[in-house]
Amino acid sequence: MTVKLTFLGGVGTVTGSKYLLEADGLRVLIDCGLFQGYKQLRLRNWAPLPVDPATIDAVILTHAHLDHSGYLPLLVKNGFKGPVISTEGTRDLCAILLPDSGFLQEKDADFANRHGFSKHHPALPLYTQKDAERSLASFRPVPFDREKELLGKLRVTFRCAGHILGAAILELGWGDKTIVFSGDLGRYGDATMLDPTPIRRADYLLVESTYGNRLHEKQDPEDVLAEVITSTAHRGGTVLIPAFAVGRAQSLLYHISRLKQDQRIPDLPVFLDSPMAIKASEVFCRHVGEHRLTAEECNWSCNTARYVREVAESKELDMNRMPKVIISASGMATGGRVLHHLKHYAPDHRNTILFAGFQAGGTRGAAITAGAESVKIHGGQVAIRATVDNLHMLSAHGDADEIMRWLGHFEQAPRRTFITHGEPDAADAMRYRIESELSWACTVPDYREETVLT
């Protein structure tokens, strides 16, 4: 039996993950992510999918981040009627992330229309909150480490990937072939998440390469956080942390709670200003056993912050001049409440904008961390005079050495390894390392490239 694999996203970039498998008259889509970052990538979200959604029999998600799940509401809206297979944690987080994504798109379109800065008249959302809510009925969650038969021909098993709650390495058996998708691999020895599960064999492997050409800093994140928060407070400033609502926000709360307990930082108020991050934190605490924290540690960490749920409360934070810490989504400053805070805090040299991990090319986060003097927000330029820093060591992605460590558990080389989910330089660096250190046959695929797995 031959299987055709088509790369519909997640190649040449770290966003838009979509991998289409076709065999035995079936079509299965692995991940269903939004393209983010550069405009030419974001425009792909608006273009018709190269395959009719109504002809796709099932979607399997590795995890809930929008670059892996965020296109799903549009897929359903455009005719997909099959099941969405995921872990229970991924289903629970998608129930937060997807409606929020639709809501924010509606709000951004409305804001653009009211202020007249969109080139489109009227500006429209890619999909709505109701579209996203309708897509949730398609989910069919599966526990970790339990093989599920799908469509009478596929064998699906999720293994823990670390990274975020519910994130999975996917082992897919189809006929006599085993195809493994790494998803996004987490860190070894992470403070909150479990190590990625070792995989022993695969006929074909798709492995991510987000940090394929880099190593994470070895600094203790709590040392850096303590220095940044303390120095900013002494200037009378505020620390604004754009953070991914799922995973990163919970890690930050854990580290800040430890710093407060050990009295290593001033007793500043900490605000979690992201309804999505608040809900994700509550989900995180319900899934004890799928991460390193006990129920007590979860509750203690989450209680470190004051939850900001209402828009009026969020606006009040910008009027309050007291030194404080604000954690707000999104993590790459692509949307959400953090944009309003950036407009207020970025022009003031007393403040610090502290990012917390990888910033994809084309995002405001990438521009700001690269030293941009100003960025465009809501149709106008905002000066960046605040101190800018990045907690690279808090990344939820394994770095190049950690990816190689995970690959080292394979007992024999896959027939072919596809390097995905990386910027071109990172993907090619990972290809070179795998070929030179492991002597595996590797390919860095192109967008919409097709290959036959024999």
Image (tube, rainbow, N blue to C red):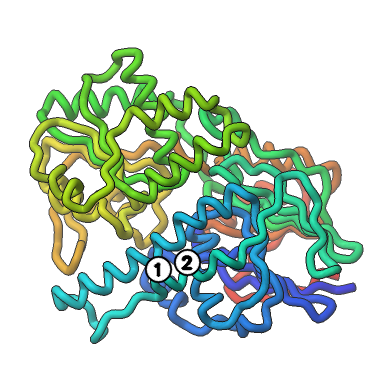
Q: Is 244 situated left or right of 162 in this image?
A: left
Residue for badge 2: 133
Percent x, y of residue 56? 67, 78
Tell me, yes or no, whether the two marked residues, 2 and 1, touch with CB atoms within 8 Å.
yes
Percent x, y of residue 378? 19, 65
Q: Secondary structure at mark 2?
A: helix
Q: Residue at x 11, y 48 (%)?
A: 347
Q: Residue at x 15, y 42 (%)?
A: 317
> Which amino acid type corresponds to the residue marked 1 in the rendered image?
Gln
Closer-to-camera residue (227/49): 49
Q: Residue at x 51, y 56 (%)?
A: 94
Q: Secondary structure at mark 1?
A: helix
Closer-to-camera residue (101/255): 101
Crowdedness near tag 2: few (<14), some (14–19) or many (≥20) residues, C-alpha within 10 Å: some
Residue for badge 1: 129
Quadrant position of residue 318: top left
How many labels, in total?
Answer: 2
- In the figure, 349 relative to 116: above or below? above
Percent x, y of residue 190? 54, 31
